[in-house]
Image (cartoon, coloured by chain):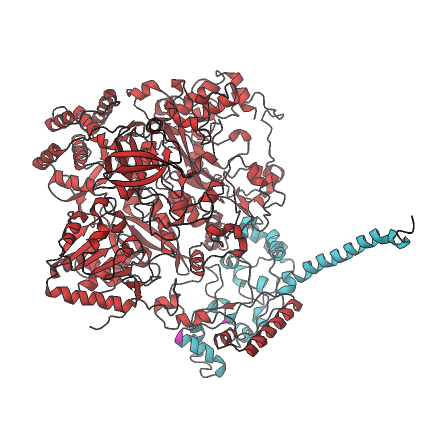
Amino acid sequence: MSDIFPKWTNKLPLMVGLSAALFGGAGTFGVYYYAHPGYTRVGYKPIQPVAFSHTIHAGQLGIDCRYCHNGVERSWYSNIPAASTCMNCHNQVLKDDPRLALVRDSAATGKPIPWVQIHKLPDYVYFNHSVHVNRGVSCVECHGKVNEMDEVWHAKPLGMPFCLECHNAPEARLRPPAEIYNLDWQRPANFTETHGKKFAHDWKVLSSTSCSACHR
Amino acid sequence: MKTIPPACREPDNGVQYWRSLEALEGTPEARAWVEREFVDGAGELKDPVTRRDFMRLMTAGFALAGAGALTGCRRPVEKIYPFGKQPENYIHGVSQSFATAMPTRHGAVPLVVKSHEGRPIKVEGNREHPINTVAGRAHGGSDLYAQASLLDLYDPDRAQRFTKGGNRIEREAALDQLAQFATQFSASRGAGVAVLMESSSSPSRDRLVKSLGARWPEARWFFHDAIDLGVAARAASLAYGRSVQPQYKLENAQVILSLDSDFISTEEDSARHIRGFANGRKITEAGLGSTRAPSGPAKQNATMSRLYCVEAIMSQTGANADHRLRCPSGQIIAVAAAIAAAVEPGMPAFATLAQKCPLPAGVKREWILECAKDLVANKGKALVLAGHRQPPAVHLVAHLLNMLLGAIGNSVVFRAAPAPAAGIEALVAQLGTGGVNLLVILGGNPAFTAPAQLNFTAALKNAKAIVRLGTHEDETFSALGANGWHLPTAHYLESWDDARTGDGTLVPVQPLIEPLYAGLTETEVLARLGACESLKSHDITRETFASLTGGKMDEEKWKHYLHDGFLGGGAADHQPPATSLAAQNIADELAKATAPAAPSAASIEVVLFRDTKLDDGRFANNGWMQELPDPITKIVWDNALLLSRKTAVELGFENNDVVEISVGGRKVAGPVWIQPGQADYTAGIALGWGRQKGGRIANFHGNDENSNRGRTGFNGYALRTDSLIVPGAKLTKTGATYKLVTTQDHWSMEGRPVVREANLKDFNEHPDFARNMDLDAPSHSAHIPKDDKGQPLTIYKHPYQSHPHLMSSMHQWGMSIDLNACVGCNACVIACQAENNIPIVGKDQVHRNREMHWLRIDRYFTGTPLKQKAASLLGSFANNLTSSPGKTDEVNLVLADPAQQKKEWIDEPQVVNQPMLCQHCEAAPCESVCPVNATVHDEEGINVMAYNRCVGTRYCSNNCAWKVRRFNFFDFNKRPLENLYKGPLAGRGADEMDLVKLAKNPEVSIRMRGVMEKCTFCVQRVEAAKISQKVKAGASGDVEVRDGTIQTACEQACPADAIVFGNVLDPSSRVSKLKKQQRDYAVLGFLDTRPRLTYLARVRNPNPAMPDYKEHPMPHSISEYAKRSGSPFEPHGSGPAAGGAKKGAH
């Protein structure tokens, strides 16, 4: 009888099991790692139609975020400014610069500038900007230090674990209302203990972790 | 003649559904950038493609695809297109609301419409409008027509082309033609011009009609309403000798008599009637202490209004009546005369009329006398209404009674109204003489709705030229002939106009979007025919406004008017009630009146009625309306030939038998539906169905034996004469059957006290009766295992018991529905559908119980157990369960058993409506069985669905005791209804799909196939309100949402103000106060799932002197309950304990 199956086949189940575990594990890890927004999104830095530099505008010139993104305190979205907003300054500054041709054109004709979208949440996520920036969460928490980005890139993963990290312990991210748009603000040591918890308590920051907080 | 530039440009290619905001501002580039949405390189495909180009592109495509995979499957590049110029006061992502109004035949429904990124997505009632303040409380309810009108805006079958002789022509050419007519007929002073219009309350249209009339004095004007609701106004005008229109204020009436008047649903201004009626029915309990006072119930001294109803067809008004008299429609004049003669025996006109029209057999004189006595006893607080089907004589009797009973100026007020004009018969006569050179048809669909004997379609051929403004390319479109111009109508959400609401207040009709198909309004057509200076509806409306507010345009006033949605103060010109009557008119009219011979099995009376869903047929292509269960029959996607049990038995018909109705040589065939409560020898047919050319919904053609085969319902207009009551019909069986699909039998009470009701007297004595009917009331739960505290052990785990820290201590949401106020009008169902992106599924899927409505209205009929022949649903269940399962007299009211249709007990049913939606149980049975945690509680007590987690096991639905969960068996949004089974192989047409997308609410996820869904308490509104409050709070702790800020879609739409949503942790919130009432009960509360939605038990108010009260001194459902479980009105524990124990043992 022993002639029917050679001896090495005794190890076959073990090998099949091991390789299944190996490939299965690798597959799972692969999906977990490579399909995760931390891999797929972070670092995404597309070429924009206009070479707009946040370093110059928000960093060196110190223009407030809300000068251009003026809907952020009232709306779901932080709007991309209309070309007419750019022209408020650029009809004086660099008014004939060829790099601004598209902007001038857009402001004159109403034809929109086709900016490439960087930060995008799935359609089933209902994220609201206004409720975050009005309640002590700075832009920098999700977008990184945009004031140091020549070209904006995707700095944080913005996946569900990323959201929950803060929603579970908001006190670690809350800052004084005056510093929301100050992207360079340094969080003092022990700030969470000395202030963060107090903010969370006084403002009744009840960051929901229920499904309905973001999915409707 | 010079062409006037069009109001908006023709689309460059294909149809244009929606223009961007730039387009609204008029920038020419609006179209061009839409194309930029495609990636660079797609443009090359437009050039002639050589094989080499094709290969190059394909290779590049494959290379890119490979590169994409290697670089980690990035999502496709998407662009953001901001404005070139920032519009003022516009914030991206913040929806805007605009006040407007939906014009109706003789009034308007004041509305506030929500617009998201330039497209209207939800219609709501305007709570600021004076008509919406009743008894000091403002609530902006609306009706289901207004709710569903939104979908009509996005109807892909709307007329989109300008045509001549059925062929497309340019818009400019059509407008030039109008200008040419304007000059051509000016010379002849309008001789040979006939204009056919529907009724409208628009002062702008009125003004233009007058100015055109001055220019064309020879032109003739005709009015045709498919369903004429103006008869009450005409009768009142006759009685008072000048042109007036009545407005009814039911909140001021204690005793209401309806003479075939379905004021709750099919009369003008029904939303306002419901509001007033419900206000009179509501009970506020006095002396409320703790919820379950150990000292016993506090006796009440509540009062409420009483409704008597005389009618042939079971209507929603009849369903809500305390006393209902079945009577053929033609015989109602006899009942009216008898009541009038009893109210005022001294009036000879009444006595003569009563003598001339003897009471029909079977009507008890005692009923008449006691009803009259009750009316007289409530002088000053009584009101009589007559329905639009009834002849003027009945209306005159009603007006006279109102006068005698002191209702004028109190529960009925009059205002001046335009005088009525000639009808469509006169037009047909003129067409017959060949004297019509130009016929202008503004609105309506006369070829479908005109009385059959006029043969309007044939008469149209005599007109030398026809201009028709129509919403659809429908039956009238087909009848226009070679010399007919057809212009598309702009939807009211696309047009400027004005109107007057029932109280006479001026309201603006304001557009929210440019016309999708470049349609025109009636005023624009009239202005062009009159060669007016202002040709745009906006300018026309402004001019009217200026003329109505003192001649000069006041910009500030205009802005206020548009902002508020009505013109406050002074505009409503109420006329003081007339004191002197035009006695001669009344005498003449009453002398003319006769009662037709009583109907019999050989001579059936056909009663044609306005459909509660399709109106006169104008909503036939509206999927929401087609799939909405009829409030009484619960039939979807069809109408039926409604017969009483006795009639059907005598003629040998059963449900679904197709029967031919022939009267006066005209024939139509339709399926029979046996309707409890219908008068014998009458046949009810809802109008508006059976459209020959209605659109892809009205002419839906499925491929299942249960789906519609090219037509929904059958056409009742084929039988109509001038009157909607057609006597002398003969019914013959054709031998065929047709499957009617109804939703009511999908859900039944199964013998549990789901609906609880009592009479007012019993309620005042025992206000806690509803709680005594709880199955977990102490006397009922002796057998249930208890914990050490003596509380019954719960079946389902309470999520907050093990994790109390999860529970929010600020907000816990709950809802209360007052069954006393709910009239079952269905407005909430459509509002929910619009708000929550609920798809329609088609007739064959409804047949498989796959309808998707999150909120349904359960309608229960209860019978008379005292006859001992049969039982109500409750009783039949008990009998089936216990002793006599085989007795045919005592089986459930289910379609499966044909015997149930032939029992006498269904003849005089009582009706109860109950809105049923997710109960949001605290310890929810659905949650504990979900294997993937897709349905869970949030910390504020809402039972939420995470659609992305759901894998579609449907365990939750199985375990839900209320059957309120809905499963997406197909991708209803993406697939055409006739091809659902083909799955991804079938896609909807692009034109349909684009519009489907436009109509969706962006704040609610669209669910795909295989996902469970259900009511979420409008969580999107809850979250929006919380966010708004938090934004306001900023760096402070003021984050609690104020009571009344959140209104769920159903609550907002409810014209009865019966649904209240709010925070149950706040003791001063409305919902908390309502839940403290002793009538408060939970449906299936004994399961101890602690529903957050509770109901207020219904209270009926019968007159103890009435004959039917003497027969049944308790509501049928209560007598049935008492027989089994003991009276809820007696001290507890005295009922048959054994029965109680048995019943509890589920």
Colour in which the image shows chain B: red
Residue at 61% over, 63% down = A156
Extreme-front residue of the structure:
B735
- Image quadrant containing the N terminus of chain B: bottom left
Near-viewer residue (B1096 or B698):
B698
Residue B407 percent coordinates (x, y): 20, 33
Q: In the rendered image of this protein, does residue B539 appear above or below residue B763?
A: below
For residue B724, say whether it is visible.
Answer: yes
Residue B342 percent coordinates (x, y): 18, 24
- Image quadrant containing the C terminus of chain B: top right
Near-viewer residue (B836 or A80):
B836
Query: Would you say the magenta stretch is mainly helix, strand or loop?
Result: loop
Left or right placement of residue B631 versus residue B777 in this view: left
Residue at 20% over, 52% down = B459
Residue B143 falls in image quadrant: top left
Q: In the rendered image of this protein, does residue B767 appear above or below residue B821?
A: above
Taking the magenta stretch, the answer to whether it contains residue A183 is: no
Residue B630 falls in image quadrant: top left
Residue B83 percent coordinates (x, y): 43, 69
Left or right placement of residue B124 versus residue B777 in this view: left
Extreme-left residue of the structure:
B584
Colour in which the image shows chain A: cyan
For residue B1127, say whether it is visible.
Answer: no
Magenta stretch bounds: A109-114
Residue A122 falls in image quadrant: bottom right
Residue B211 percent coordinates (x, y): 15, 59
Taking the magenta stretch, the answer to whether it contains residue A110 is: yes
